[in-house]
Amino acid sequence: MASSVQILLVGGTADGQSVTVELDSNGRPPLTHHHLGSGGLAEAQIYELESAGDDAREWRYRWTGPAV
């Protein structure tokens, strides 16, 4: 069974929301998250993983812009 974690989204249209993602075999979440808009993938917002604190296992997804 894969482990999962909730990660905060920072910036963009989903600011303040969190997503639950599965961790890989090394205990890390996906490097990006595509937050779907009402128009699906055509209106997706891209978030990139970054560290959130001194602990190597604290993360957040930072908004980088719309998918184009």
Image (cartoon, rainbow, N blue to C red):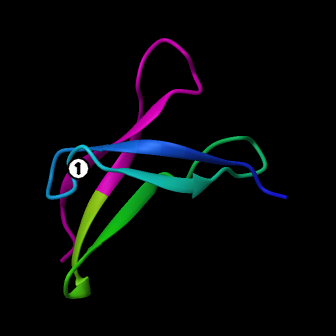
Q: Is residue 33 above or below residue 62?
A: below
Residue 8: name its quadrant: top left
Number of marks: 1
Q: Is residue 8 left or right of residue 65?
A: right
Residue lying furthest top: 54
Q: Residue at x 75, y 42 (%)?
A: 26
Q: Residue at x 55, y 16 (%)?
A: 55
Q: Position of residue 37 (x, y in %)?
A: 22, 76
Q: Residue at x 58, y 48 (%)?
A: 29
Which residues lie in the magenta part?
47-68
Magenta span contains residue 61? yes
Q: Secondary structure at mark 1?
A: strand
- Quarter of the image with the C terminus is bottom left
Circle 1 Cα neighbour tier, 10 Å, few/some/many (<14 / 14–19 / ≥20): many
Q: Is residue 35 above or below residue 40?
A: above
Magenta span contains residue 58? yes
Residue beneath label 1, please? 63
